[in-house]
Image (cartoon, coloured by chain):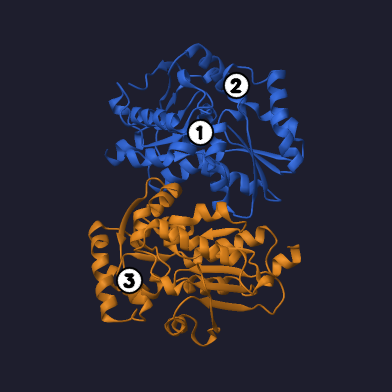
Chain colours: A orange, B blue
Amino acid sequence: MSGEAQRRAPIGVFDSGVGGLTVLHELRRALGRESTIYLGDEARMPYGPRAAQEVLEFSKQAMRWFADPPGLATQQCKLVVLACNTSTAVALDTVRDLFDLPIIGVVRPGAVAAVSASARRHVGVVATEGTVRSGAYLRAVRDVDPLTRVTQVACPELVPIVEAGEASSPRAQDAVRRYCEPLVAEGVDTVLLGCTHYPLLRSAFETALGPGVRVVDSARTTALAVREVLESHHLLRDGDGATHRVFATGPRERFRAIARTIFGEELPTIEEAHLGS
Amino acid sequence: MSGEAQRRAPIGVFDSGVGGLTVLHELRRALGRESTIYLGDEARMPYGPRAAQEVLEFSKQAMRWFADPPGLATQQCKLVVLACNTSTAVALDTVRDLFDLPIIGVVRPGAVAAVSASARRHVGVVATEGTVRSGAYLRAVRDVDPLTRVTQVACPELVPIVEAGEASSPRAQDAVRRYCEPLVAEGVDTVLLGCTHYPLLRSAFETALGPGVRVVDSARTTALAVREVLESHHLLRDGDGATHRVFATGPRERFRAIARTIFGEELPTIEEAHLGS
């Protein structure tokens, strides 16, 4: 790609479902002139309970889609955000090795945000089973600060609740309260929402944890990391006319309903995508 | 340890030989009130050409020594710097899992320093064979900025040259010039000295690379990372009376001669240490 074509190219965002739309939202706030392409693997969500090998395979299929988007030859991305924590935890290094695409994950920006926010340096991480099992947040936090304590809690019920459109239900509040109990007992002062679906449950977390605990997510810091990288390579897009496309595998009706709670009336059309063989 | 005992505890520094003394030197500049314990595994250097499994085993032995330093019960460290790039590249995550010691490696601080210094974001990394083979710098640089290009060169001759006390010899200059040729040909604008021995060859690198290329190392940024972590945990030592001890396995005469070129007259006594079973 020429410099000008590269500047005009969109930023890709991938997630296992709707959760990554919270990252897309922050990206569009931080980088209003950029075009974007979102891909949600709605048909196969949630990734959290799946075996690492399967998450790796699905993540490779998604990056292959971004490297050569079917029918979108002129829409090759200049950078892709792996907005799924489980994918980042399991697959980031491998897909970076395999594809000639600059890829940014959400685990490191999340770890940086959590350590910065934590006054007493005791951080709770709530995430999917796959992310917790991978130990990716333990490693990322230790890399930023090896003296920060980390308490992890796997929350397998939460992604299905969000994807069912029940983020504001009593069932959601009840589940969040149960998952927060060990964090409150351990005395963490900051909780990182280590799954891109969880910002949709932020108020439930804030209520369950009480006013003494800060709740942070990786969406904002990831968007800032993307801006910093594009800026330093003179790859920010200038001018108007940015385009936004959203693709989903599987049922698009449910996807649209949840997306509307994030984007309100600005929701773009949701197009169909196919992953895998 | 109580808070006061922890603040008074020394900082540990480990290297395969004398190279880590360049990190110790920067630590003492940045943190003049801290006590230090240095351990150089002189008897088994260089680590660079060894198999990963062997480097891992030696690194575990060293961290076990720091966790319970023989005859130094009152000298448990509050933090240990794994100042050997090869050990960091191969063993950091494992020893962090195994030992209840906060451990800081040199790869990430080095990657941060290199990306920050590089105007055109094309970085050369010179390192041992083990470090190059591990891909640790490729991963660390991509984590900071996935669009920065990295060209790696393994330099197997350099550690033996430094350890032989020949860092200023024509042989050293010749070897450095050969290793720099592909970096000059590729047009890197910054070279990271990805081995703690190489700062002793800095002027040879600067001559071989020419005035258009910046030469950075991880010693300074690692020292600043240590200060930042200790500060944020209120673990900086106050008051006078810091003590400094240097231990080496194997031949201490050669070690002393090279250490003198780094520390001049302030060289502490070099004591004997044993690692392994």
Looking at the rendered structure, the number of numbered marks drawn on it comes to 3
Q: Mark 3 lies on which chain?
A: A
Please say whether residue B55 is visible from this viewpoint: yes
| Residue bearing mark 1 | B86
If you read the primary sequence from the N terminus, does the residue marked by circle 1 or circle 2 appear first? 1
Q: Quadrant of the C terminus of chain B?
A: top left
In which image quadrant can residue A228 be found? bottom right
Numbered circle sitting on residue A158: 3
Q: In the image shown, does B16 or A70 lie closer to the viewer? A: A70
Instruction: Report the residue at 37% width, 73% height from top.
Output: A202
Please say whether residue A113 is visible from this viewpoint: no
Q: Which amino acid does label 2 sit on?
A: Val
Tell me the element at label 3: helix
Do the residues at pointers 3 and 1 share their chain?
no
Q: What residue type is labelled 1?
A: Thr
Residue A96 percent coordinates (x, y): 55, 54
Q: Which amino acid does label 3 sit on?
A: Leu
Q: In the image shown, does B74 or B151 lie closer to the viewer? A: B151
Q: In this view, does B218 lie above or below A95?
A: above
| Residue bearing mark 2 | B162
Q: In the image, which is nearer the foreground, mark 2 or mark 3? A: 3
